[in-house]
Image (cartoon, rainbow, N blue to C red):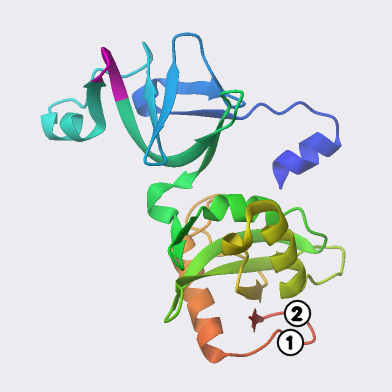
Amino acid sequence: PLRARATALGLPVVRTYGMTETSGGCVYDGVPLDGVSVRLVDGAVELAGPVLARGYLGRPDLDAAAFEHDGGRRWFRTQDVGSVDAGGRLAVLGRRDDVLVTGGAKVAPTAVEGEVATLDGVGEVCVVGVPDPEWGQAVTAVVVVGTSGRTPSLEEVRAHVARTLGAAAAPRHLVLVDALPLRGPGKVDRAEVARLAAAEVARDGRTGADGRPGAEHR
């Protein structure tokens, strides 16, 4: 990933978080700007402060859904899920609609992707849910093999993710592909990845000797 390459070159990378409703970035490397407050409500990120927009022009219905007054402050309900550590640093885990529910546990795909991406042999990765009669959704890692020539195994991926994020987040399927489908410059088409993954898993084939395409299951 671009961030990893920049870090390897010793280039400082600051990750910003914000949106149109917050006048752009208002949280930098997990730390909110002065005057900006962050809270989690049912796991969803909410923001308050002078950076908030007044509302949506001519759309009071959207205003009512997105903004609320609580404790003397006006809060914006984002559709992102996140976590806040003991030091008050925010980590955004992904969109609420992208969260997978597997065996009753909620799993943030982007968190799993971040862990899988650190493994040798992984060039790119997208994590999606595949319908499963037992788990509801089975966490599935769709991987483009990197240039090292090494192909990661499902057991390796599962062990690493279980160790860092917990057993519920460990992928139950590993699908290897030549490239991830895109729906814009650098933007992965998650819906198409999910369709592709479901088709591969349904075929019940194991990863071929060349590592692509195919699926490995547990």
The kind of residue tagged 1 is: Gly
What residue would you read off at disc 2?
211
Spot occupied by residue 98 in the image (x, y as percentages of width and height): 43, 55
Q: Is 146 rendered above or below residue 154? A: above
Q: Which mark is residue 152?
A: none
The residue drawn where x is 27% and y is 16% is: 71
Secondary structure character of the magenta stretch overall: strand
**Residues at marks 2 and 1 touching, judged by CB atoms closer than 8 Å:** yes
Range covered by the magenta-colored residues: 70-75
The count of marks equals 2
What amino acid type is highlighted by mark number 2?
Gly
Q: Does residue 72 show up magenta in the picture?
A: yes
Q: Which residue is mark 1?
A: 208
Quick one: 163 or 132, which is closer to the camera?
A: 163
Q: CA distance from mark 2 to mark 1?
A: 5 Å
On the rendered structure, is 104 left or right of 143?
left
